[in-house]
Image (tube, grey):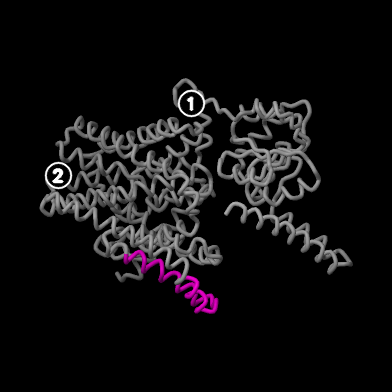
Amino acid sequence: MNEFFDFTVLIALASILALIANRFRQPLILGYIGAGVLIKVFGIIDPNDITEFKIFSEIGIVFLLFILGLDLDIANLGNLGITAFVTGIGQIVFTVLVGFFIALLLGYQATSSLVIAVALTFSSTIVIVKLLSSRNDLDSLYGKISISFLLVQDLAAIIILILLSAAFQDGNSDQIYLKLAELGIVLLILGIVLYVINKYIAPALIHFTLYDREVLFISMVSLALIFALGMSQLGLSKEIGALAAGIALSTRKEALQIESWTKPLRDFFIPIFFVLLGFSIDVSDVSSVIIESIVFSLFILIGNPFIVMVIMRLLKFDTIVGFQCGLTVAQISEFSLIVAEFVRNNDSSIISSSDLTMLTIVGGITMSVSSYMILYSEEVYSFIRPLLKKTFLYIEEDYDVDSYSKQRLSNKIIVFGFNRMARSLIPLIKRQKHKFVIVDNDPEKLEFAEKFGAKTIYGDLKDESLLNGLKLEKAEMIISTVPDINANLNLLYELQNLTRKPVVIVTALNDEDASKLYEEGASYVVYPYILASNFLHRVITNKDTIRSLKRAAQKDQEYISQRNNLHLVKK
């Protein structure tokens, strides 16, 4: 059979199982992994042939991390530096120590136990970015924190690979120090290169393309691939190279357009990574390592989130933020398998093929289960919240509501969520001289809001104690700009118990959510497509079309000007 036939079968089977998973509202990752398992079990594609497709999975990873880099706000990540470092390193230390003793109890030798414990340490940045992106949570507080400490883990993984490489070469400490020094120099050079590209090379390259879509697209794709190749040649990983390329372009005005062009490539190639992951599971060894696989999977699914929740509790983050961050480390990553395979290739007496199969099974189980946990994190949190209340991990969220009440603001308008929509509304609210307050669970957004005189409260729309303390019945209008169906339903359920109900406006992103919000009592649902349609209807049916368009354009320009001024203040 030829390569084209094999590739067509792989993609077709992956798409069929993804369609089934999507139909039953399951994570698409499960469909892709399942396709790989089926290909392996039924021998649909020869094992020697399918490995030729590994290059496509690597390309998918490159584009996934490149897009993440385009989306990253380096200033925000810098502000989360301490949290990222403490959480990332703390979780690594915990997993290594506890995983080592669990492996010893299961009968592994000390050296094998240490390697397995290290392999279990790393969480999959690729899987988490994919899941957070599907939930539109990359820009959320827990999303930014999670991505930050996962990047810390990725850097730690590279250091560990360097140490292992030096240890298997000759074990000379001077060699190890030399490797680490080389890593430091490479990172320093990388920072300088990113600055030069952002300030000089990218603008010149984009200008040279004359904004020809095809030329600009292929130029940016080549930049991502060149960075990925360059970093892998310098001892880092393709993932870090691709991420760096995205970061170099993230502040460019063309970043959003480049991202939209690149996403189809990511969505086509990244499923191949998960298909190959499913294919790598050696089903013949499953029965011999099933107990170990289940034990280690439970440890990753329960132990890792627990330690992250403990660390986040000590750093005084809300319980739900700590819980959601914890879920992002409830799986092992491709780095885990790379570390194990590297050791096996150098000394099979430490890590055997069955050990590698065990780790692959753990990866499949933890990636699958954690996908559910992340996609349904609000429901999981609601289920275990009564249990958490009995432990030291639970913080009775202190939103300083009493202080808010003492201010006697008598706010006519309460706005949940400080995003683009909220920033557009603020000039209008201030012009009408309404008293209002902004509620958000991201301290940085609240600090931004305060810079132009908004009164703010730190809090999560999903938390009942916050809603009770806000005295919602005294408000004339409540606006939720948060497009989270569960959060908005929580707000509407709370309002149903009030004797005096304010006007409540919530936000939806699809027909199903909009219908459900209306059924639960929303006064109005902000649905972008309907708003645009209604506006165009008024314009078309208005005889004075040109004048009405000019008035609308003038108002829009005023709002845009206000928003731009706010961004300048932030910078």
Residue sitting farthest toward the top? 390
- x then y, percent, for residue 197: 43, 68
In magenta segment, residue 303: no
- x then y, percent, for residue 144: 48, 46
Whole-angstrom CA distance, mark 2 to mark 1, is: 41 Å
Q: Is residue 510 left or right of residue 323?
A: right
Q: Earlier in the sequence, mark 2 or mark 1?
A: 2
- x then y, percent, for residue 560: 69, 59
Query: Would you say the magenta stretch is mainly helix, strand or loop?
Result: helix
- The amino acid type of the residue labelled 1 equals Tyr
Q: Residue at x 46, y 56 (%)?
A: 68
228 is higher (above) or lower (below) than 345: below
Q: Which residues are magenta?
A: 202-230
- The amino acid type of the residue labelled 2 equals Ile
Near-viewer residue (29 or 59): 59
Q: Residue at x 61, y 40 (%)?
A: 440
74 is higher (above) or lower (below) than 453: below
Q: Secondary structure at mark 1?
A: loop
Q: Which residue is mark 1?
A: 394
Q: Which residue is mark 2?
A: 350
- Of the numbered discs in the image, which one, if any, rests on residue 281? none
Near-viewer residue (388 or 294): 388
In which quadrant is the N terminus drawn? bottom left
In which quadrant of the rendered view does residue 15 lie?
Answer: bottom left
Residue 330 seen in render:
no
Residue sitting farthest toward the right? 543
Near-viewer residue (432 or 342): 432
In which quadrant is the C terminus drawn? bottom right
Q: Is residue 91 left or right of residue 454?
A: left
Q: Residue at x 12, y 49 (%)?
A: 171
